[in-house]
Amino acid sequence: MSLEHGLPTSETSARAASSRRGLRTRPTALLPVELPALDELARPNEYLARHSRSFRFAASIIPRRQRGRVARVYAWCRYTDNLVDGEVSSELAAGRLDLWLARSWDAYDGRDCGIDLVNRVMGEMAERDIPFAYARDLVRAMRSDLDFAPYADLDALRVYTYRAAGVVGRWLTELHGVRDGWMLDRATALGQAMQLTNILRDVGEDLARGRVYLPLVELRRRGLAVGDIEAMQRGCRPIDAGYRAVVEHLMSIADV
């Protein structure tokens, strides 16, 4: 059975469809890319070294016995991101997100969703009373990429960076038993700063996907528009002082 047929359009209908069709018996057949097995994630240093230098560095200062939890959360988040970045239609990717979120909710709510990694990650989340809203917000961020609209200003971009990465900072912090509000705020800010630097690094790659995350108001202040960024990417226009000013300004925000 394939996700291309009969996709549910909401979290509730996805969960119901999963139950009706017996999808638990062949969960991997529903997945567009392969999830890492739990035994692979039992070697978190190796896994993170292959997939994320920043997570690998961060995990290196965490006690060794706790690094597996970080790797499992990273694997869940990475897979969520992969659901929308493949060469598939927006409708198919949205349906996959619906089903993925429904499976994750099942596991968080104590039901076997049929995917070992999801059962483990969501089970650990629920055991520590970490809000499922973090997982839902990250899915919302990925969903916004499917029907992308440029961000008008920094406040709009901050909503996206919170959902895409700020919640991950909070999730990992609470996963290690830290509930202090000041620390959670710092974890949120770190996640958002990392997402912002990723945006600045990946301007060309995102353009190829039809997305420009740079806030429009910041471009206009330097006499630029999205078309100008596209021209720079094609080599039809030199990278000028205005673009550099936008990048420097956003980098300074990430540094705060």
Image: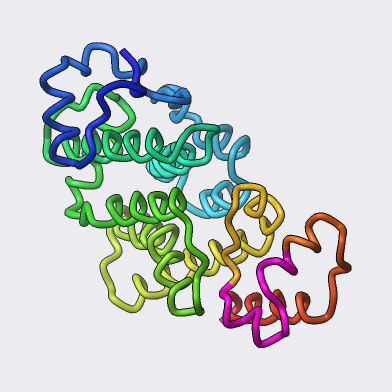
Q: Is residue 228 magenta?
A: yes
- Measured as percent of width and height from the top left, residue 187 is found at 42, 68
Q: Quadrant of residue 13?
A: top left
Q: Is residue 18 magenta?
A: no
Residue 68 showing in the rendered view = no
Q: Which residues are magenta?
A: 215-229
How many numbered tags mark residues here?
0
Q: Residue furthest bottom?
A: 221
Q: Residue at x 44, y 48 (%)?
A: 146
Q: Residue at x 43, y 58 (%)?
A: 164
Q: Main secondary structure of the magenta part?
A: helix
- Measured as percent of width and height from the top left, residue 39 is found at 42, 22
Is 59 positioned to the left or the right of 229 in the image?
Answer: left
Foreground residue among 255 and 21: 21
- Measured as percent of width and height from the top left, residue 42 is found at 44, 29
Relative to 38, residue 68 above or below: below
